[in-house]
Image (cartoon, rainbow, N blue to C red):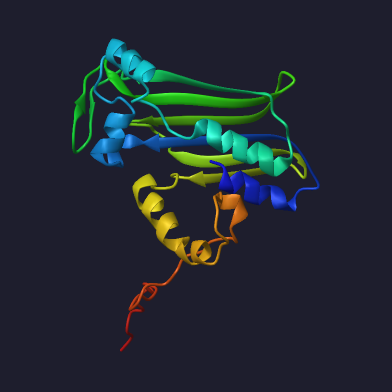
Amino acid sequence: MDGLPVLLSAVCERVDRVVVNRVQDARFRRLAFQQKIGAGLTVEQFQARVAQGSVRHVGMAQSIAMIADAMGWPIDRITDEVRPKVAYADVASEFLRVESGQVAGIVQDGVGYLRGDPLITLHFEAYLGAPEPCDSAEIEGSPRLSLNLRGGIPGDIATASIVVNAIPRVLGAAPGLHTMRDLPLPAFVPRVGSSPRLARRKRTS
């Protein structure tokens, strides 16, 4: 939710606002993720765990700060609000079942402000049965850009893959604390013995 809009901004001559949306169908995520978004809890249990800090998407404020730093915006306030997505019908994953009225997942909004103007908005939804998963980024400016990855990025695969594929860039970095915007653009790193899965052509007699 941060590296992608920062990359898109590279083709802009002016950036006025950044809006990012991520919607995930949590039925296909690992159990630990489903628990982290509060799936299967009552609304009261959900609110209690939000207060404890155990239910939420971690890193929203940090992503806003990274985007703001890249844009050169001295934002003066960040909000990070979490609310439950309540199931209106029974829904289940491989790991758990959510009944109507229970929490199916999370809706979270982070906003970065400068003098009261919302310059950065990050919207995150992850719940069992989300009908239209996607990852999208919009940049208001010149030019105005809109990118929508229909189906979204599979979080469990992507989390591991970005770590592995960034290893060569990390090894080449100077000592110290770096963010994704400090490193050269990462890319898929071929593994030993790996090759593309090419489409098989039908043999003609």
- The x, y position of residue 192, in whole percent, is 35, 77
In the rendered image, is residue 128 in sight?
Answer: no
For residue 69, above or below residue 182: above
- The x, y position of residue 33, in whole percent, is 31, 36
- Name which quarter of the figure residue 145 lies in: top right
Quarter of the image that includes the C terminus = bottom left
For residue 148, above or below residue 198: above
For residue 55, above or below residue 146: above
- The x, y position of residue 98, in whole percent, is 22, 24
- The x, y position of residue 80, in whole percent, is 52, 23
For residue 198, above or below residue 66: below
Name the side, left or right, on which 56 lies relative to 147: left
Q: How many marks?
A: 0
Extreme residue toward the front, this view: 175
Extreme residue toward the bottom, this view: 205
Q: Nearer the viewer, residue 82 or 169?
A: 169
In the rendered image, is residue 21 in sight?
Answer: yes
* Residue plotted at (72% across, 41% down): 71
* Residue plotted at (61% across, 51% down): 181
Q: Nearer the viewer, residue 34 or 77?
A: 77
Name the side, left or right, on which 120 lies relative to 124: right
* Residue plotted at (68% across, 24% down): 76
Name the side, left or right, on which 131 lies relative to 35: right
